[in-house]
Image: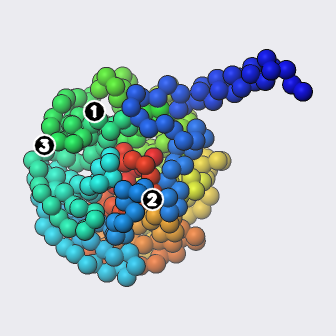
């Protein structure tokens, strides 16, 4: 029989080691990380929150060039609803509490509510330059990514009242993701070829990093183990691997021309990369940090989107093709291409699994 002292010592050692990882010292108020080895463990296939379980499964497509939203039934691949919104809608973003979708119209300086229980348009609010929007992991603030005026606006997540504007030292800030413990975020600056690091609690810039060769960084996604930020680079035609804690480049994976959007699979094993300029999807294996395979989208311009709740379909907008793609994640075959409005951009598949939303087109944990 083991000594009680040795047994207790072993337990203490286990917890010390467990707490030493990327999820240690979490942001106050952030829901606990369920699995320190997989920050997406709450996003598994079919694991829908009670909040969204009765919502109809739909695909919401913002058409930047048509100032409209098309709503697609994913079972029939048909558009079942169409409505006008403000000027240049860029993304459809789920709220932190999962109860609301927001259409972000940056040139119109508005956000328009969609009720996901009905799929119908609701009220419109005035918000300055909402190119993109995220939520702090504690749910207190919506972070409006005001790209054209070079700042991040921290707003009350419930009322959208402006609390603090944070200027960023770069041009074209547009996408981000948060550390496993929620303490900081890494944001891409498309027109400066750089990344910025922001302390979430103090709402301050704490670092910046110029990418090799300048680049044109786009989407940002944290690895399931919380160790590496993947950053798509449309100019470098691949994905940078970034150590967020030390803010340094670990490596680079060539994926394809115009690497743009990043989406984790429901089993947290692979990362889908949309290569917009060459019409392809690269599949990165998280474990080996290598490109495992590539799928073609003939004559397509795959951009932003999301993965279906069951994990079987990757939905992407065809940014310059006036269409949306449904791609089978089993072997990458094209299930459907659906004609929509002009300039479809950050489409949202909803509902999706997860306890809470960090924003964009659906980043859940």
Q: Which residue lies under the disc numbered 2?
A: 48
Give the x, y percent position of residue 69.
Answer: 21, 67
Residue 89, numbered circle: none
Q: Residue at x 33, y 52 (%)?
A: 98
237 versus 163 height, above or below: below
Among the two numbered marks 3 and 1 on one chain, the one whose residue lies closer to the N terminus: 3
- Quarter of the picture holding the N terminus: top right
Q: Is residue 178 visible?
A: yes
Q: Which numbered disc, 3 or 1, marks the residue closer to the eye? A: 3
SS type, badge 3: loop
SS of the residue under disc 2: loop
Query: In this orientation, which residue lies closer to the viewer: 9 or 288?
Result: 9
Q: Residue drawn at (32%, 38%), measured in percent from left and top?
A: 139
Quickly name the residue at label 1. Answer: 170
Which label's residue is closer to the chain start, 2 or 1?
A: 2
- Picture residue at 60% right of the left edge, 25% below the top: 20
Q: CA distance from mark 2 to mark 1?
A: 38 Å
Which numbered marker is on residue 128?
3
x and y percent of residue 355 in the render?
43, 49
**Which residue occupies the foreground of this view, 15 or 79?**
15
* Residue shown at 63% from the left, 30% from the top: 18
272 relative to 88 in the view: left or right? right
Residue furthest to the top in view is 5
């Amino acid at each position: 029989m083991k000594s009680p002292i040795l047994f207790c010592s072993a337990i203490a050692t286990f917890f010390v080691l467990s707490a030493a990882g990327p999820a240690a010292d979490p942001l106050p108020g952030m829901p606990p990380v369920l699995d320190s080895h997989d920050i997406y463990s709450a996003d598994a296939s079919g694991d829908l929150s009670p909040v969204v379980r009765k919502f109809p499964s739909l695909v919401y497509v913002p058409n930047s060039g048509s100032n409209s939203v098309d709503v697609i039934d994913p079972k029939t691949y048909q558009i079942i609803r169409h409505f006008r919104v403000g000027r240049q809608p860029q993304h459809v973003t789920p709220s932190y509490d999962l109860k609301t979708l927001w259409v972000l119209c940056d040139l119109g300086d508005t956000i328009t509510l969609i009720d996901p229980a009905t799929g119908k348009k609701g009220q419109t609010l005035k918000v300055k330059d909402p190119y993109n929007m995220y939520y702090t992991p504690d749910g207190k603030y919506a972070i409006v990514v005001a790209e054209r005026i070079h700042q991040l606006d921290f707003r009350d997540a419930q009322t959208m009242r402006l609390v603090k504007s944070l200027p960023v030292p770069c041009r074209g800030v547009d996408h981000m993701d948060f550390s496993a413990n929620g303490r900081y975020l890494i944001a891409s600056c498309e027109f400066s070829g750089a990344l910025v690091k922001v302390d979430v609690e103090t709402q301050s810039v704490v670092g910046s990093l110029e990418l090799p060769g300048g680049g044109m960084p786009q989407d940002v996604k944290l690895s399931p183990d919380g160790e590496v930020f993947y950053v798509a680079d449309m100019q470098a035609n691949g994905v940078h691997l970034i150590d967020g804690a030390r803010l340094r480049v670990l490596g680079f994976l060539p994926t394809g021309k115009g690497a743009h959007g990043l989406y984790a699979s429901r089993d947290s094993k692979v990362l889908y990369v949309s290569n917009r300029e060459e019409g392809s999807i690269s599949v990165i294996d998280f474990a080996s940090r290598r490109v495992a395979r590539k799928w073609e989208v003939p004559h397509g311009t795959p951009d932003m989107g999301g993965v279906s709740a069951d994990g079987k379909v990757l939905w992407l907008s065809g940014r310059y093709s006036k269409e949306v793609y449904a791609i089978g994640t089993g072997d990458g075959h094209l299930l459907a291409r659906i004609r929509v409005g002009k300039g479809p951009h950050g489409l949202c598949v909803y509902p999706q699994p997860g306890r809470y939303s960090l924003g964009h087109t659906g980043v859940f944990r």
